[in-house]
């Protein structure tokens, strides 16, 4: 774990509460710990470095999906063509469960009577995905927690990454910088301050070992056989295309004798961008189904669209194309 020497000082009045002394630290068990500026028994643990999660199949938890869309005359977007990519990764920030005990034992041996461990305060984090000459950066106002990342890629980086994967030359990495807050003793008084903790997580994308983690899909394609379901895609939230949008409800109506069957799926922010609607019975592709999209806005309003006939399409993309970059 790298620790830049640069410190950012914020000359602000210091509250009476306890805070880490950024000038008093040591590395124990591979963890940087900071002593409290008032109580020598309180120590703060720097954030654990990120690591790649292991999936349910005991393989590295990452994936790359590439989607291509070619507009059609029947849908009014005949001249539209785009390529989008989605890189996913499961990130954990776990520490060895026995490490805190060993750290406390080490501090006791150094004279701390009753060492207590706390998490280091973090003011914000900057995370960058890097591969080849490409990079994508985002910020958040707290520590970078363990999570399932879904990162959209525009056409150029998506194509570059896919070609690199096919050539077995791909190494991507996450560079993480977190702003740790505390105090330093300066000119006879404690002043609030920050320092930066940096770490890098490399990920080797191995298509030969894990081919099931890499998919390229042509949306709007047609099949020649009967089907029992439809794959539905919605990139609106992933691409942040409509900031007023809270949810998008997709209804699929399947014609049957007596009354139509209606299946429904809802897309929201921070959830999956693809879903599967399973029909209760197999259908002949010559029989069209209908689709209706309802936009639910953040202010509570509902924008209910018309029913639109679809025929033969087993992959349905409900993204607002007109708002997307081509």
Image (cartoon, rainbow, N blue to C red):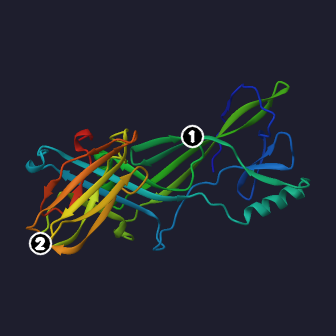
What label does residue 141 carry, if any? 1
In space, the residues marked 1 and 2 are separated at their CA atoms by 52 Å
Q: Is residue 310 left or right of residue 128?
A: left
Graded by Cα atoms within 10 Å as few (under 14), some (14 to 19) or many (20 or more), the crowding at tag 1 reads few
- Element at label 2: loop
Q: 217 or 76, which lies in front? A: 76
Which residue is painted at 26% across and 39% down in the image? 323
**Residues at marks 1 and 2 touching, judged by CB atoms closer than 8 Å:** no
* Above or below, comparing residue 88 to residue 15 in the picture: below
Residue 17's disc number: none
Q: Residue at x 17, y 67 (%)?
A: 259
Determine the residue positioned at 31% across, 53% down: 249
* Residue 254: image location, x then y, percent: 18, 65
Residue sitting at 41 percent across and 55 percent down?
271
Compare marks 1 and 2 and give the one earlier in the sequence. 1
Which quarter of the figure has residue 99?
A: bottom right
For the residue pair 199 and 149, the one nearer the viewer reads as: 149
Instruction: Residue 260: give x, y in percent of width and height.
Output: 18, 66
Q: Which numbered dot is residue 284?
A: 2
Q: Quadrant of the C terminus?
A: top left
In this view, the residue farthest toward the front is 258
Looking at the rendering, which quadrant does residue 300 occupy? top left
From the top left corner, tell me how far across and down residue 57 is, in percent.
Answer: 45, 74
290 horizontally vs 241: left or right:
left
């Amino acid at each position: 774990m790298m620790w830049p020497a640069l410190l950012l000082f914020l000359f602000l009045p210091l509250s009476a509460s306890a805070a880490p002394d950024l000038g008093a630290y040591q590395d124990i068990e591979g963890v940087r710990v900071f002593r409290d500026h008032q109580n020598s028994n309180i120590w703060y643990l720097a954030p654990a470095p990120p690591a790649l999660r292991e999936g349910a199949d005991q393989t590295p938890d990452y994936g790359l999906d590439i989607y291509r869309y070619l507009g059609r005359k029947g849908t009014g977007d005949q001249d539209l063509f785009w390529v989008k990519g989605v890189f996913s990764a499961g990130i954990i920030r776990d520490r060895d469960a026995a490490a805190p005990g060993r750290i406390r034992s080490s501090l006791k041996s150094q004279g701390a009577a009753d060492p207590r461990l706390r998490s280091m305060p973090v003011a914000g984090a900057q995370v960058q995905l890097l591969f080849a000459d490409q990079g994508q950066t985002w910020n958040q106002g707290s520590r970078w927690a363990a999570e399932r990342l879904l990162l959209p890629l525009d056409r150029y980086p998506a194509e570059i990454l896919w070609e690199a994967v096919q050539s077995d030359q791909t190494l991507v990495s996450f560079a993480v910088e977190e702003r740790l807050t505390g105090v330093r003793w300066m000119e006879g008084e404690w002043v609030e301050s920050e320092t930066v903790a940096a770490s890098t997580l490399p990920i080797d994308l191995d298509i030969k070992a894990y081919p099931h983690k890499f998919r390229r899909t042509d949306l709007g394609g047609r099949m020649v056989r009967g089907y029992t379901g439809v794959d539905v895609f919605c990139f609106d939230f992933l691409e942040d295309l409509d900031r007023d949008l809270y949810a998008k409800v997709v209804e699929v109506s399947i014609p049957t004798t007596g009354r139509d069957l209606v299946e429904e799926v809802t897309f929201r922010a921070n959830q999956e961008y693809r879903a599967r609607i399973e029909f209760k019975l197999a259908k002949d592709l010559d029989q069209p189904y209908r689709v209706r999209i309802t936009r639910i806005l953040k202010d509570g309003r509902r924008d209910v669209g018309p029913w639109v006939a679809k025929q033969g399409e087993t992959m349905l993309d409900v993204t607002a194309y007109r708002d997307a970059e081509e």
